Image (cartoon, rainbow, N blue to C red):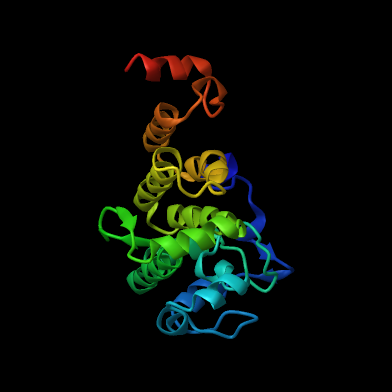
Amino acid sequence: MQKYRHDYPEHRSNLYFGGQQQDDMPNLQFYREQIPSSPDGVFIEDYHNNWKWQYLKLERVHSYIQWLFPLQEPGMNNQAKELTKKEIEAFLQDETAKKRLVKSYKLMLDFYGIQLSNDTTGEVRRANNWHKRFDNLDRNTHNNLRITRILKCLGTLGFPHYQAPLVRFFLEETLVKGKLYNVKESVLNYFIFAVIDKQERRDLVEYAYKHYEPKHEFVWCPKKIQMTFSNGE
């Protein structure tokens, strides 16, 4: 997580991946509707238009998530490519690609029973289908890895302000409302620490501490920091 938050220092993907130069920028080409994902052969608009509400497919197929949410690190699909610095710079200048990334985010939020309630701030809330989708999320814990990837991708490709609202949502669901028992550990260990903004990350740790029981088992920040939380400083 530290490497991610510091933009992968000395990362080699700027030059080569698998022996091939990355001048073609496959992730950006995919988001520009120029090439399909591999190995599934699906274009980005097809994902948005034809995979929506296809919950069984979204659950069982594991090769699409690296295309929808690319990172500067490898995933389980060896036919997906790592993002390069050059590609990130180009993606951030491409408004069409960024709008499509938000659509991908909404697609996966719906799969998890969540709705993006404010496209500007990134605020989220429970969707109408949250009961069944939460059950699926609790049963299939590989989705915790997917959510971590989504959070990292949002931070890399122009939507870091979307990170904290989603993490806050999961903290509230797990620590306050007592839902998503099998997601709670990932929220505390990974989701929080994917948030790039240091103050937002600290605020999330404080929120977690104030709602975590028993307090003496809270290990996600030093005791000295916990004391400042307790004293309201």
Q: Residue at x 62, y 68 (%)?
A: 81
**Where does the N terminus fall, quadrant-wise?**
top right
Q: Residue at x 54, y 73 (%)?
A: 58
In this view, 96 is above or below 232 = below
**Where does the C terminus fall, quadrant-wise?**
top left
> Which of 138/58 is in front?
138
Q: Residue at x 38, y 72 (%)?
A: 100
> Which of 109/36 is in front?
109
The quarter holding residue 128 reads: bottom left
Total labels drawn: 0
Q: Is residue 147 left or right of residue 11?
A: left
The quarter holding residue 154 reads: bottom left
> Which of 136/97 is in front?
136
Residue 118 visible within the image: yes
User: Where is residue 168 drawn, in percent x and y?
Assistant: 38, 43
User: Where is residue 53 drawn, in percent x and y?
Assistant: 43, 77
